[in-house]
Amino acid sequence: MKRSSGILLHISSLPGKYGIGSFGKEALKFSKFLKEMGFSWWQTLPFGTTDDCNSPYKSFSAFAGNPLFIDLQTLAEKGFLTEDELKENECSNPYFVNFEWLNKTRYKIFHLAYERIDENEKNKIKEFENKNKHWLPDFALYMTLREKNNNTDWYLWKDEELKLHKKEAVEKAFEKYADEVFFHEFLQYEFYSQWEKIKSEINKNGIKMIGDMPIYVSLESSDVWANRELFDLSEDGSPRLVAGVPPDYFSEEGQMWGNPLYNWELMKKQNYSWWIERIKNSLQIFDMVRIDHFRGFSAYWGVPADAENAKSGNWIKGPGMDFFNVVMKKFNNSQIIAEDLGDIDEDVIKLLKETKLPGMRVMQFAFIGDRDSIHLPHNYEKNIIAYTGTHDNNTILGWLWEAAPENRKTALEYCNFTGEDWGMGGYYSESCRSVIRTLWQSPAQLTIVPIQDLCGFGSDTKMNQPGVANGNWAFRITEDSLNQIDKKWIESINDIYRRK
């Protein structure tokens, strides 16, 4: 990887008329905007469906895309929607994603589009299905059956045969609900075909895409429903233990994520084929992918499913290098980023060295506790992806305001802040610029800044507050905000520090 830089912005946060960012002209325009500033990379969050809390880290499938990213204008250009229908789906709030409104209205217009597809389109969808048989039919049926069961999850269904994914019952359900299943396949076809086209144009503009893969999948997913043997479940389908992390920087009680853990023993016997398909799928969508919670491959925190919080969990040995030996035979290690943040021990460090995957550093962690933290830029190695903050962090400005005075003083001194007002935000914030410039000077091969930090925005624009269920994932950037960014300044430091 060449010395370079990038921006962190999820697709949902793009500007646009229809309530959420999409695979439309705004995505292409944003990639051109990045290139003008000397960036080479655009990092997003996971592309999967979101849960009831709107989190993209807990999806109904490890393979399916979020239909809300489908561009309505593209559907209209194909003749599937009218201009009046587009107008009816415009949203007046450009600052936040209104998920409640989207979930009530967006599928209605998708159904209108579906009713108008022709035989040519149907044949393309069938061809897409044939290429994705390992996940698409089960996902499409699962989403259909959830709707038929009042949007409840598979382990709550009254039909025991369908609940247990019995072959005969599943085959009958495919026949009975053929049209509804095909509707969900239509949505996935549109998602993938639109993204393939727009990503090709983004790459032509000189920008590469970094995606994000959660290590775990949701208990409420089609993956678990259709492949229960791959997960550590009881006979009734409930997880024996659930995933999480012990108490850390983000939460005194730890985080209890609720995801089922993997049956690594069986996965090993199958040569990790499910994981290989998953990584392959991600690297077809993105140029590089960040695997979230890398330390879970070394050892993972298992918490009793009925526990009140994550404190009562314990570390369980993961698949380690045995897994990555198989992965590295299939994929280039320069295509995978290891999210090695959090509670890291010697075994994790050893595994990272053996895989030779680039790890991560976050500047906001550099000034807490250890005076010689690995997150201080002068301690970075070249094979590192370094951030001012991630989607789980505060913005630079919000962090400075909320930091302990002694930590803030140390950070500002380290970053050679010479301004008069560290608390001033905005597009010309001197304190934000000093932090970004310090990161850009580091040896890290790739540096990434969330778009909020380039704008000097405060904590009200952060993407996620870990451990808090509501009020997250809704941030959107506006066209006006993008136009106010000082492009010349960021282009100059990309040039000065040889990241352009």
Image (cartoon, grey):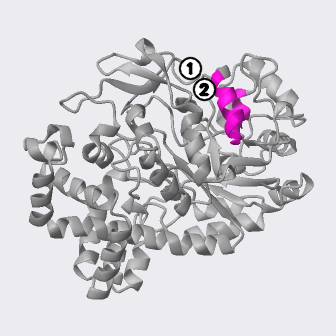
| Secondary structure under the numbered disc 2 in the rendered image | loop
Q: Where is residue 366 in the image (x, y as percent from the top left)?
A: 75, 27
Q: Do the residues labelled 1 and 2 touch (CB within 8 Å)?
A: yes
Give me the C-alpha separation between circle 1 and circle 2: 7 Å
Q: Looking at the picture, which amino acid does disc 1 mark? A: Asp
Q: Residue under circle 2?
A: 342
Front in this rendered view, residue 274 or 123: 274
Instruction: Inspect this view and state whether residue 200 appears.
Output: yes
Q: Position of residue 487 (x, y in %)?
A: 78, 61
Q: Which of marks 1 and 2 is in front?
A: 2
Q: Is residue 277 left or right of residue 295?
A: left
Which span of residues is magenta-colored? 347-365
Give the residue at x 89% y 58%: 495
Q: Which of the 4 image quadrants contains residue 371?
A: top right
Front in this rendered view, residue 73 or 260: 260
Give the numbered dot on residue 336.
none
The tag earlier along the polypeptide, 1 or 2, is 1
Q: Is residue 205 left or right of residue 217?
A: right
| Secondary structure under the numbered disc 1 in the rendered image | loop
Give the residue at x 49% y 59%: 94
Front in this rendered view, residue 10 or 311: 311
Q: Is residue 487 magenta?
A: no
Q: Does the magenta stretch include residue 360?
A: yes
Give the residue at x 66% y 62%: 208
Q: Looking at the picture, which amino acid does disc 2 mark? A: Gly
Within 10 Å of the Cα at label 2, are there few (<14), some (14-19), or many (20+) other Cα atoms? Answer: some
Within 10 Å of the Cα at label 1, are there few (<14), some (14-19), or many (20+) other Cα atoms? Answer: few
Please determine whether, in this image, residue 330 is positioned above or below residue 467.
Answer: below
Q: Position of residue 16 (x, y in %)?
A: 50, 67
Give the numbered dot on residue 248.
1
